[in-house]
Amino acid sequence: MRGGGKTNRAALVFLLPFGTLFVLFFVLPIGYAVNESLYKLKRSGLGFGTPERVFSGLANYAAVFRDGTFLSGVRRLLLFGIVQVPIMLGLALVLALILDGYAARFTRFFRLVYFLPYAVPGVIAAIVWSFLYTPEISPFGLDLLGDGVVLWSIGNIVTWTWTGFNMLVIYAALKAIPRELCEAAAMDGASPWRVAWSIKVPMVRPSLILTGVFSIIGTLQLFNEPTVLTGVTTAVSKSYTPLMWSLQVALDNNDYSLGSAIAIVLAVLAGALSFLFLRLSAWLTRRGVM
Amino acid sequence: MRASMRAQVLTTAFLFVVAVYILLPLWWLVVSATKSGGDLFDTPGLWFGELHFAGNVERVMSQDGGLYPRWLLNTLIYSGGGALGATLLAAMAGYALAKYPFRGRGAVFAVIMGAVLIPAPLITLPLYLLESRLGLLNTVWGVLLPCMVSPFGVYLARAYAEAAVPDTLLEAGRIDGAGELRIFFTVGIRLMAPALVTLFLFQFVAIWNNFFLPMMVLNDQALWPVTLGLVKWHGIRTGFLRDAVVTGALISIVPVILAFVSLQRFWKADLAAGSVKL
C-alpha cells in the first residue's frame, strides 16, 4: 500500500483524538513541571507581601538531594525493593510452575483464587489489612504497625495484591512452551525439578524480566498503601516515601517548584533503574547465569 | 504422565496454603461486614458474631447524606467511561500506526514508547498543577480525560492490528469505495475486538486502582470515587465509621470480583504482555 495524501489524512484523523489528550495530559504536564522546577519563590524582606518568582537553575534539584527526607525515603524503598520484589516474583514463579505442571490438583480453582486480589484496589486491600494489623481487632493479636515492622506490613499488602497478577503473566508464558520439549526431557530421565529449572525457567525469562521491571517501577511509586496506613499508625509519616513527600511539599508547604523537582527526579530514577535491570539481566544471560 | 502420590500431595498442599493466605483477608471482610461496630472488637475475628449486616448496609448507604451510593456511581463513570474512551482512542491510534505508512510514523511511535516507561503516578503532581491552570480541578473531566490516555494501550493495539487485520481486506474495502473511517469501524475494529475487550478490562482495573489522581484533583466529596471516600472515612482517628468502612469495602469489590469470574476467558495475560497470538 502506498501512503498517498488520502491515507495520510486518514492516519491523522485516527491519531488526532489520542494525540490531543496525550499532549494535553502527558507531555504538557511534564514540560510544565520541568519549567516549574527551575524557579524558586523568593520572599522579600520579612516575608510579607507576594513572593517573587525567580529563576534558580538546578537549585531545587540540589535541594532534593540535600534533604534527608528524600534520601531516607529512597533508602527505605531500596530496602523494600530488594526484599519484597524477589519474594513476590519468586512466589509467583513457583506457583506458575506448579500450576503448569501435572502434579497438583484443582489447578483451575487455585488459579482463580490467586487472581482475585487483582480485583481489589490497592487502597481497599490496605484498609482491610490495616484492620488485620490492629491488635484490638486483629484475629492474630499482633501489633504489625510498629516502627520496626510496618515496612514489611506494607510489603505484605503489596505481595498479597500483586503475586497473582505476576503469576498469570508467567503462567501465560509457560503455556506457550511446546509440550514436546518438556516431555522429551522427561523421557531422557530429567526430573520435574530439572525440567522446570533448566527448560521452563529460561524459556519464560522475558516474562520474568517484564514483571521485574513492572515491580521496580511499582516500588518507586509506592504511595497508596502507606498513605492509607498514615490514618492508623504514627509509624508512617506523611513523607514516608519520596512520592508522598513530593505531595506534602507541594500541597502542605505550597512549594510547587520543589515538589515538581522531586517528581522529575523520581521519574528519571524509575527509567534509569529499569534500564539498569534490563542490562543486568542481559549480562547475566550472556554469562549463562540465568 | 502421572505424578507420584507424594508429589501430588505436596504441591497441592502448597497451593492450598497460599490460597488460605489469599482468601484470609477476604474472609475476614465478609465476616466483619456482618458484625456491629462493637462486635468487631468483642468477637473472634474469623467467625460470625450477631448478624448485623442489614444495619451496616443501611448505615453505609445513608452516612453523610447518602454519599456512598454516589461514590459507587462515580467509580462506575470513571472506570467504565475512562476505560471505554481509552480503549477506543488506543484502538484508533494503534490501527493508524500499524496500517498507514505515513511520514513520521517511527517518530510518533518512539515518543509513545518512551511514555510507556514513565509511570502515571509520577506525573500526577505535574498534572495537578496544569489542571489548576486549565480550570479542570474538581471536575469530572479532570479525572476522566487523563484516564483516557494509555500509551501502553496504543502499543498493544498496534500489535493487535498488525496481527489481526490483513491489508488485503482493507484494500478490498477501498476498491468497493468505502471511506477509511468506515473501513475501520466495520472491518478493523471488529477484527481487533477480542483483544480490545482484554485491553478494556485491564484499563478498567487500572483506573479502579488509581487513587492518587482523584485524591489530587477532586475536593468535592460528591465527585469522589468509592476508594477515595473509604480512605477518608477510614482515616478518621476515632474510628466511629469502622463498620461503615468494612461494609462499604465489601460492597464495592463484590461486583468487580463477580465480573472477573464471569469474564475469566477475556483475562489474557499474554495479550497484556504484548504477545499477539490471537
Image (spheres, coloured by chain):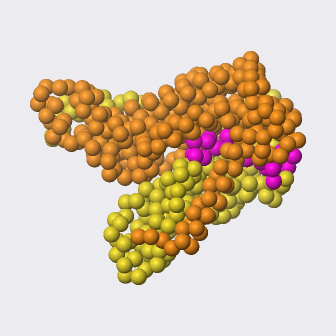
Chain colours: A yellow, B orange
- Where is A81 relative to A124, above or below? below
Q: Position of residue A97 (x, y in %)?
A: 50, 65
Q: Identify the residue shown where x is 61% and y is 64%.
A: B14
User: Outermost residue, top direction?
Assistant: B65
Instruction: Report whether B73 appears left or right of B264.
Output: right
Q: Residue at x 35, y 39 (%)?
A: B194
Q: Residue at x 32, y 44 (%)?
A: B160
Instruction: Look at the image and give the residue range highlighted in magenta.
Output: A116-140
Q: Residue B31: name its quadrant.
A: top right
In the picture as drawn, the residue positioned furthest to the left comes out as B175
For this orientation, the residue located farthest to the front is B5
Q: Nearer the viewer, residue A202 or A269?
A: A202
Q: Can residue A239 be seen here?
A: no
Q: Is residue A139 magenta?
A: yes
A93 sits left or right of A72 in the view = left
Q: Is residue A48 above or below residue A30?
A: above
Q: Looking at this view, is B141 or B111 the one in front?
A: B141
Residue nearest the viewer, comparing B1 with A234? B1
Residue B30 location (% of width, % of height):
70, 39
Q: Is residue A254 left or right of residue B196?
A: right
- Number of numbered labels in the structure image: 0
Position in image of residue B72 (x %, y %): 62, 26
Q: Quadrant of residue A92?
A: bottom right
Counting from the top left corner in percent of width and height, residue A228 is at 73, 42
Q: Main secondary structure of the magenta part?
A: helix
Q: Which is more toward the observer, B12 or A184?
A: B12
At 28% across and 47% down in the image, what residue appears? B163
